[in-house]
Amino acid sequence: MTKEPLILYGHSACPAVPTIKGMLSQTKVNYAYVNIHQDSDAAARVRAINNGNESVPTLVFPDGDTLTEPSVAELKVKLESLGYKVGIVAWALGNAWRILLAAIILFALLRFLAII
């Protein structure tokens, strides 16, 4: 595991940032969060990484690799390649919106089936 922090670029309007933050925190990854709406240099860095787009979350790893809008699976693979163990709680935090959506759909389906 590396001691250098990775950098997580994001902003408060992005719904994916909290899940990525939760996954990183639960995995005990040393990271720094930078809000690109509050730091013009950071916004320029994100645009440079993403062909002019301010796509977030964008992660910059100590080894120089970057991930933009990564899936939970992509982030898990990268973190494990750096020596982190991504547990089930970290995975669940990373997939929180999917789990919630599945629960809502399942609840609606069960209610519908109970009516007919």
Image (cartoon, rainbow, N blue to C red):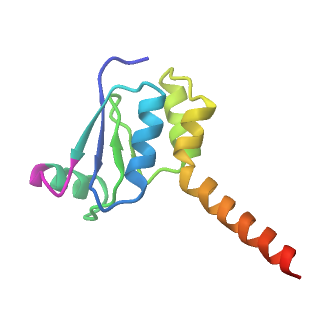
Of residue 110 and residue 90, the one placed in the foreground of this image is: 110
Residue 105 falls left or right of residue 29: right
Inspect the magenta stretch and tell me whether residue 91 lies in it: no
Q: Residue at x 36, y 52 (%)?
A: 57
Q: Residue at x 58, y 34 (%)?
A: 89
Quarter of the image for residue 43 reads: bottom left
> Where's residue 3, x and y in %?
33, 17
> Where's residue 90, x and y in %?
54, 35
**Residue occupying the far front of the picture:** 115
Quarter of the image for residue 15 reads: bottom left
- Position of residue 22 relative to residue 57, above or below, is above
Q: Which residues are magenta?
A: 35-41
Of residue 4 and residue 104, the one placed in the foreground of this image is: 104
Residue 89 falls left or right of residue 113: left
- Position of residue 77 relative to residue 73, above or below, is above
Q: Residue at x 34, y 56 (%)?
A: 56
Q: Quadrant of the C terminus?
A: bottom right
Inspect the magenta stretch and tell me whether residue 39 lies in it: yes
> Where's residue 62, x and y in %?
32, 28
Residue 10 falls left or right of residue 24: left
